[in-house]
Amino acid sequence: MAVKIRLKRIGAKKAPFYRLVAATDNVPRDGKTIDELGYYNPLKNPPIVNINEEQVFLWLRRGAIPTDTARSLLRNQGLLQKWDAMRKGKTEPSAPTAAEG
């Protein structure tokens, strides 16, 4: 059973609201999940996206595969670029210290 990072709809009728979750690929869209990673509210202008970066990286390290929509949200938040940099061994530049400046 593969783990996927995907959206789980929790909003009311005609008022969508989604949670970004880690779930096995054989459970229904709104079924039992393993972990909640964030949320997405498409009705606000601009849409509200709140994602726990550490949890997403944890599940990506474990081999979770994002769905197309989840991948789009992660890309728009800049998390896929950070993930690619981490995988290639690059770290984010640290702030200069007082000794350097």
Image (cartoon, grey):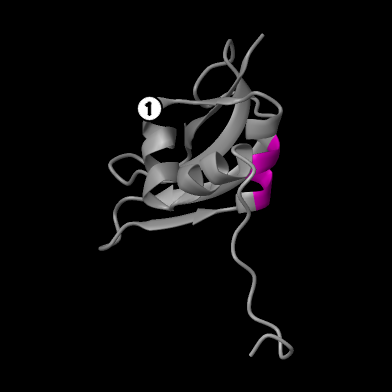
**Magenta-colored stretch includes residue 55:** yes
Q: Which residues are magenta?
A: 54-58
Residue farthest toward the front in the current orientation of the protein = 100
Expressed as whole percent of the image width and height from the top left, the position of residue 22 reads 62, 31
Q: Is residue 60 left or right of residue 75?
A: right
Q: Image height check: is 3 above or below 1?
A: below
Give SS at disc 1. Answer: helix
Quadrant including the N terminus? top right
Where is residue 87? Give x, y as percent.
61, 37
Q: Tell which of 75 and 34 is nearer to you.
A: 75
x 64%, y 70%: residue: 94
Q: Residue at x 60, y 51 (%)?
A: 53
Q: Nearer the viewer, residue 62 or 19?
A: 62
Q: In the current view of this chain or complex, which residue is farthest to the right?
A: 99
Query: Is residue 11 in view from this perspective?
Result: no
| Residue 99 seen in this snapshot | yes
Query: Of helix, strand and loop, which mostly describes the magenta segment?
Result: helix
User: Circle 1 is placed at which residue position?
Assistant: 68
Q: Is residue 33 magenta?
A: no
Which residue sits at x=35%, y=43%? 16
